[in-house]
Image (cartoon, rainbow, N blue to C red):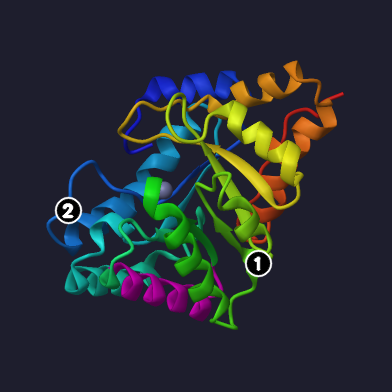
Amino acid sequence: MVSRVTDDYVRMATAGCQAICEPAFWAGFDRSSVHGFYDYFCQLTEHEPKRAAKFGLPHFCWLCINPKESEDLKLADDVLAIIPKFLNRPNVLGIGEIGLNKNSRNEMKVLEKHVDLAAKHDQLILVHTPHLEDKLKGTRLIVDLIKSDKRIKPERVIIDHVEEHTVKLVLDTGMWAGMTLYPESKCSPARAIDMVEVYGDQRIWMNSACDWGVSDPLAVPKTALEMQRRGHSAAAIDKLIYQNPLKFLSQCPKFKIQRPWQPT
Ligand SMILES: [Zn+2]
């Protein structure tokens, strides 16, 4: 939501969204020091929940230094050092979105430190995978690194931005697979549903890309409509867009939402 306007909250609430889960993310520019991250974590844990609450939406978040800014190892260490102060705040779900952007050595080092931090504090993990030609290699590096840390339970990790060539690789590890929906490029609603039709609906969830490029906070409800058009049942749609995220996120005891009504 750092990149979105208040009208997006209105639209999401109107479309039936029940909660917002915002990963720590790039601010549209590289922050110059750890102080920028301190303020950002305050925004995510104090100010943004208040903005969301005005529209009846519970707001949750994830904390980390994102891979795009983790090339500077000194800065990354400084940011990692302040994260524990925020972990017990009521809307923090875990560590994320960590991962790789360009699959560099420094990004790998910072990823390993985040995984260690999550293990020490028993946190859920949300992982960003690189886009385009770096995705397959980056996804392999990430799942191998996480699998090698025996303290991490795979069912407490979600690997985000999977595509056709990485979804099976992720599901075979016992981790969750996130499909990030974009209106045009990358994973469109139609491609996401194709993947569900091939690989099933276990340990898969969908999320709306809400970043600095062209993106649509209503991508998930629009995908639900497309599933309905293709003949998926209401129960199948509900499992994918509501029950699955609820199951994963409820592993964090702080994640509690009240649904106003049940689908018939
Ligand atoms: Zn991402």
Which of the pair 110/131 is nearer the observer?
131
Q: Count neighbours of disc 1 (C-alpha within 10 A) and say few if under 14, some if 14 to 19, many if 20 or more.
A: some
Which of the pair 162/52 is nearer the observer?
162
Is the shortest distance between ligand 1 and the CB of mark 2 under 8 Å?
Answer: no
First in sequence: mark 2 vs mark 1: 2
Q: Residue at x 74, y 36 (%)?
A: 197
Tell me the CA gap for discs 2 and 1.
34 Å
Of labels 2 and 1, the one closer to you? 1
**Three-letter code for the amino acid on which mark 2 is drawn:** Arg
In the image, taking residue 35 as reference, residue 175 lies left or right, namely right
Q: Which span is picked out in magenta?
A: 107-123
Query: Label 2 belongs to which residue?
Result: 31
- In percent of width and height, residue 245 lies at 66, 46
Q: Residue at x 54, y 81 (%)?
A: 148
Q: Residue at x 45, y 25 (%)?
A: 216
Question: Is residue 21 part of the magenta span, yes or no?
Answer: no
Q: Secondary structure of the magenta portion, mostly?
A: helix
Residue 259 sits in which quadrant?
top right
Residue at the far right in the pictured view: 264
